[in-house]
Image (cartoon, rainbow, N blue to C red):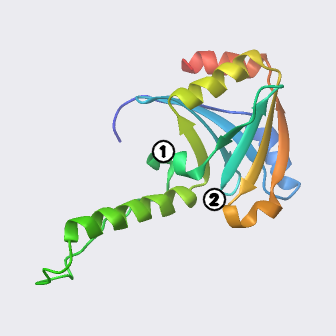
Amino acid sequence: MTDKSSCSVTLGSDLARGFIKSQGGIHYYPFFSKGETGAVFGVHNDYNIPVGNVQIRVDSNEMIELSTQETPLRYAPKLHSTDLSYIKNNDQIDKEALKKSMDTMMNDVHKISSPYTAVEGAKAEMIIDQIKTGSVLKMRVLGLAVNTAGSTVGEHKIDKTLIDALAKCGI
């Protein structure tokens, strides 16, 4: 608990998402967030399972890819702490380099395992700007790199309720 405010918007009502979920399968939803680091755009699903890479396109704009590697760590599952205390009295091992390497690897694993794929900063702002002036958001969820054959495609209509919700959040 940080006592800092944030705001999020997800497409669809709880009732509509509940109905769609009852039809079976995994459904993906765009989400928008604003916090102390600025705007975030991403995709999540109903079951909190890893999303993988995502391609989006607003109207006839260029396709934009969201990579799991771009996902902010705050959207990843619980982060680990590297413990090298078991390595004692061994001057041949650069413990600092080993720790840095293991931390980098584990952060990548956490991002890939996240039930969100998201971007922030200039890329998120560009996507959000396109959405604010667009009419249809198309998404292709590629899944994890080993599962691209199982990709899914979907569309979300961009309407006034979404634009109003984004404005209410300051996005």
Amino acid type shown at disc 2:
Pro
Residue 72: mark: 1
The residue lying at 23 percent from left, 75 percent from top is 84
Question: Tag 1: Cα neighbours inside 10 Å, few (<14), some, or many (≥20)?
Answer: some
Task: Say which quarter of the image contains residue 8.
Answer: top right
Q: Position of residue 130 (x, y in %)?
A: 70, 21
The one nearer the camera, 164 or 37, is: 37
Q: Which residue is more in the foreground, 140 or 157?
A: 140
- Residue 126's tag is none
Q: Quadrant of the N terminus?
A: top left
Residue at (56% x, 38% y) in the render: 119
- Percent coordinates x, y for residue 141 in the rendering: 75, 50
User: Of the residues under marks 2 and 1, which one precedes in the sequence?
Assistant: 2
Question: Residue 165 at what x, y percent from top left?
Answer: 66, 21
Determine the secondary structure under disc 2: loop
**Left or right of 100: which side holds 10?**
right
Q: Which residue is mark 2?
A: 50
